[in-house]
Image (cartoon, rainbow, N blue to C red):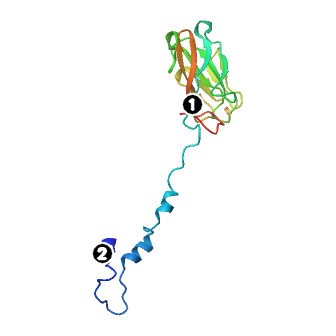
Amino acid sequence: MTPCEAASDDQAPALPAGTYRLTRRDWVKSTGVGVSSAVLAGLAPAAAPAGASAAPPELRIAELDALKPDVPVPFAYPDASSPAVLVRLRGPAAGGVGPGQSVVAFSVLCTHKGCPVSYKPERRLLICPCHWSTFDPAKSGQMVIGQASQPLPQIKLRVDGNAVFAVGVDGLIFGRHTNML
Ligand code: FES
């Protein structure tokens, strides 16, 4: 029986003995529709914690004219607990900035178990020493072999004059309780 078929409590004709008529009150009790607004208010999403929607920081990393191809520049972003590396590659890269879109940056925390990856100029790849997951900096940090299941988070870059700035992160940095998307 639907709520529309439920009889009103006071206008129903008499039923044969042994039968039971579902009243609106019975239906409300059985379905929980009568939950108070005070309880529903408790289900509203909690307010965002202070600072959760803060914009990612801008960090000046390097001067463009000082970057040499295949020479990694270590830095930390978005704070000191998240080591990262900037590299000027020898050709264009996805998400690259600067000359020929060749400058990219990544978190160095391997997405498998968090070991720090290193840039290997002879292979032009970022390689993890723990279980050998290998990531391609020219292809948004995609994993090309190994145990990890996610690409390396790519640091978003902006060039202003001769300066390269970190301005955000694409991906989830290993081990952080909060990540910026
Ligand atoms: S921690 Fe990098 S491959 Fe396992």
The percent coordinates of residue 64 (x first, y second) are 58, 9
Which corner quadrant of the image does residue 129 belong to?
top right
In the picture of the structure, the residue carrying the numbered disc 2 is 5
Q: Is residue 101 left or right of residue 147?
A: left
* Ligand 1 rendered quadrant: top right
Q: Amino acid at mark 2?
A: Glu
The percent coordinates of residue 44 (x first, y second) are 50, 53
Does residue 121 lie above or below 117 as drawn? above
Seen as rendered, the residue at the extreme bottom is 17
Residue 166 at least partly seen: yes
Q: Specify which label sits upstream in the sequence, 1 or 2.
A: 2
Q: Is residue 37 left or right of residue 17?
A: right
Which dot marks residue 171? none
Work out whether residue 84 or residue 11 is closer to the camera in this orientation and state it.
11
Which corner quadrant of the image does residue 80 belong to?
top right
Label 1 neighbourhood size at 10 Å, few (<14), some (14-19), many (20+)?
many
Work out whether residue 26 or residue 156 is closer to the camera in this orientation and state it.
26
In the picture of the structure, the residue carrying the numbered disc 1 is 151
